[in-house]
Amino acid sequence: MKVFVTGATGLVGAHSVLALLGMGHQVRLLVRNRDKARNYFHQQNVVVDDIVVGDMRDEPLVREAMSGCDAVLHSAALVGIERKRADEIFNGNLAGCKAVVGSAVEHGIKQILYVSSVGALFNPGLEEINENTPLGSAAEAYGKSKLACEIFVRALQEKGAPVKVTYPAGVIGPADPGLSESNHALKTFIETIVPITGSGGFQFVDARDVGLTHAMLLEKGCERDPREERYMLGGHYHTWSAFADRLDKLREKKVRRIALPVSVWHGMGTICDAIKYIVPFDFPMTRESMAMVTGWVPVNSSRVLKKTGLVFTAPDRTLTDTLHWLLEAGHLSQKMLGNLNE
C-alpha cells in the first residue's frame, strides 16, 4: 500500500510514517522542507525518497501529489496561539483539510485518515470523552480551526465517504522532529511547576502508539457506516497530583507544585488574555487553556483498542523514553532528570 502523508515532520506524522514503513508500506510525503524530512528519517535509519515539497493548502499540487496512492493520512496542521496569526491558522488549517481530505474523497481513495484532536470534543462538565461526545467549543484560532475541520470531515462521513478520524490526547514521545506542543509541556512541567487543581488532569498517549494505530487503521477496511470510524486515542489519564507523583518517583526528585483554587487558575488565564490585547506575547496561559487544565476528564479509548488489539505503552515507559530524548536533544539538563533510570 502506498500512503500519501502530510505532517511527516511533526511528532504524530513522523511516527505514523515510521509505523507504516515498519509494516512494509510505501509512503509519499508532502512537506515544506525536503532536507528536514530526509535528515529526520535518516536519523531513524530509514530512507524516504518520495517527497513532494509544497503547501497543504495548494489543492492542485495536492491532487497531483496523491495520484497513484492507495491511502491518505492527513496529520499536518498550523499550530500557534499568537493573535497576529489567528486568521492564518484558522483559514490555513481548514483550507488544508479541504484540499487533502476533500481531494482524497474526490479521487476515490478508499483509505483516508484525518487526525483531529480530542480537544475538539472538550466542554466543561463532562464525565468522560468518547466518540459520542458532542463537538465542543473554542475561543482560540487553533481550536476553532479543528472544529471547522471536524464539521467538514463529518459532513463527508454523513455522505458515506470512507474517512476515518482519530482524536489523540496529549501526544508525547521520543524521536520528535522538533519540539511538539505536548513534549514542550512536559519539559515545562519538569523545569517550572505542575499545577495542582481540585479537578482536571493530564492525559497523554505515546506517539509510537498513535503512529502504530494509524498504520493499523489504514490497513483495515472501512465500516459500513463511516460515522463508526471515529477513534479516541487517550492513552493514560492522571489527576495533576498523580502525574506529579509519577514524575517524582521516576526521577527520584520532586517537581515544584502550585496548588490553587480553580477560580484562581481561570482568573490568571483571563488576565493573560486581557494583557495580550495590549502587549502581544507568546505564553500558553489563556482562559481556554486553564479551562482544560482544570476541567479535563478521562478519554475512553475502548473502541480503538477493540478494533486494533493495541495495548497502550505503560506510562512510565513513555515518560522515561521521552525524558531521555529531551536530554539527548538538548531540551533538558541532566540535573532536571534526577536519577531517572533507563
Image (cartoon, helix red, strand yellow):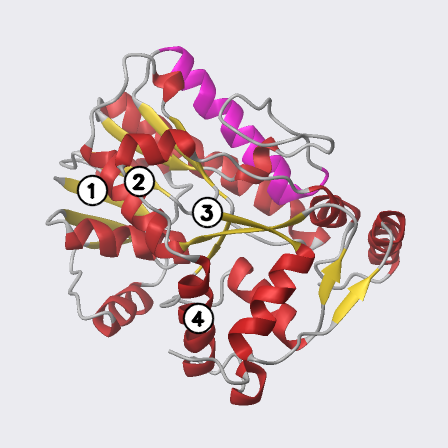
Residue 251: image location, x then y, percent: 54, 78
Calculate the distance from the C-alpha at mark 4 to the C-alpha at mark 2.
29 Å
Going from N to C along the chain, the mark reached first, 1 or 4, is 1
Q: Are marks 2 and 1 in contact (CB under 8 Å)?
A: yes
How dense is the environment of label 1, judged by Cα within 10 Å: few (below 14), some, or many (20 and up)?
many
> Which mark is in front, 1 or 3?
3
Q: Three-letter amino acid code at disc 2?
A: Leu
Residue topped by disc 4: 320
Circle 3: element type? loop
Going from N to C along the chain, the mark reached first, 3 or 4, is 3
Segment tinted magenta in the rendering: 139-159
- Secondary structure mainly formed by the magenta segment: helix
Where's the C terminus, which quadrant? bottom left
Residue topped by disc 3: 235
Calculate the distance from the C-alpha at mark 1 to the C-alpha at mark 4.
31 Å
Residue topped by disc 2: 73
Circle 4: element type? helix
Residue topped by disc 1: 3
- The answer to whether one can see residue 31 in this image is no
Residue at the spot 67% in from the left edge and 74% down from the top edge: 255
Where's the N terminus, which quadrant? top left
Q: Three-letter amino acid code at disc 3?
A: Gly
Asked if the magenta segment contains residue 156, the reply would be yes
Q: Write down the quadrant of residue 74 in the picture.
A: top left
